[in-house]
Image (spheres, rainbow, N blue to C red):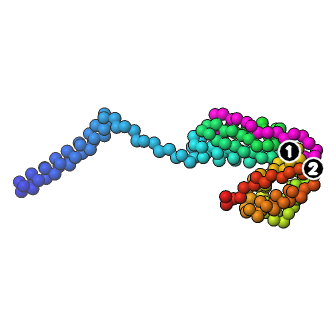
């Protein structure tokens, strides 16, 4: 009987001691001030990464209202700096592109090297004729229906440069041949890239 009472008292004392220890632990750790847990940074989606900025710049340029198949906008991201280049028909597009990129979170500097193509009725006629030859060709119907057709026709002083991306080398060759068939063109440069490259 005495053993049972002693055992019961020991168990109660053990429970009380455990409870007191549990209550004391948090205050002991608080007094010690443990170092904070390291924070995880998700590199893909923060405005401080090159990949994130590149996606944002591309998106902003594609959304510009005056951007057509007769313009070519290119960019290079280096840290927090964006360098714009290419050729545009409408001077407003040059300033709009710079303004759109400057508004992107994380961009600290924009260098604008976009060239405004000279006004020319002769070049305008070549642009329209080249557009009809290329996008009127059955092979390129799949490109023509896209919101921003991928083959850009840059015309300067009677010279055509094809820019953009196509699905195959065959498409690149056909586009080049169609541009060469435009009357009064001095030269055609094929800078089209192929998706698989």
Q: Are marks 1 and 2 in contact (CB under 8 Å)?
A: no
SS under mark 1: strand
- How busy is the neighbourhood of tag 2: few (under 14 within 10 Å), some, or many (20 plus)? some
Secondary structure beneath dot 2 equals: helix
Q: CA distance from mark 1 to mark 2?
A: 12 Å
Name, please, the residue furthest toward the bottom: 138
Tell me the residue at 26%/39% (across/down).
24
Q: Give the magenta part as a residue range.
A: 103-125
Residue shown at the point (91%, 42%) measured from the top left: 120
Q: Position of residue 79 (x, y in %)?
A: 60, 38
Outermost residue on the left side: it is 2
Q: Which residue is mark 2?
A: 125
Question: Can you identify the residue that label 1 sits on?
Answer: 156
Residue 44, how many percent across, how many down? 56, 48
Return the disc, 1 or 2, that comes first in the chain's sequence.
2
Q: Position of residue 96 (x, y in %)?
A: 77, 38
- Disc number for residue 176: none
Q: Quadrant for the C terminus, please.
A: bottom right
Snapshot quadrant of residue 134: bottom right
Question: Where is 164 relative to 171, above or below?
Answer: above
Check if residue 104 falls in the magenta segment: yes
Residue 179 location, quadrant: bottom right
């Amino acid at each position: 009987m005495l053993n049972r009472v002693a055992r019961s008292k020991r168990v109660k004392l053990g429970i009380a001691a455990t409870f007191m220890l549990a209550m004391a632990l948090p205050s002991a750790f608080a007094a010690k001030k443990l170092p904070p847990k390291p924070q995880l940074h998700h590199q893909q989606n923060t405005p401080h990464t090159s990949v994130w900025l590149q996606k944002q710049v591309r998106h902003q340029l594609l959304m510009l209202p005056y951007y057509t198949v007769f313009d070519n906008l290119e960019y290079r991201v280096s840290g927090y700096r964006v360098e714009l280049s290419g050729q545009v028909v409408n001077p407003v597009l040059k300033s709009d592109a710079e303004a759109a990129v400057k508004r992107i979170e994380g961009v600290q500097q924009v260098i604008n090297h976009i060239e405004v193509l000279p006004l020319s009725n002769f070049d305008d006629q070549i642009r329209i004729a080249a557009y009809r030859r290329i996008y009127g060709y059955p092979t390129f119907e799949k490109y023509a229906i896209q919101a921003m057709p991928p083959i850009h026709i840059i015309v300067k002083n009677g010279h055509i440069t094809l820019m953009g991306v196509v699905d195959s080398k065959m498409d690149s060759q056909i586009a080049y041949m169609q541009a060469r068939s435009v009357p009064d063109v001095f030269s055609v440069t094929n800078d089209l890239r192929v998706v698989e490259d």
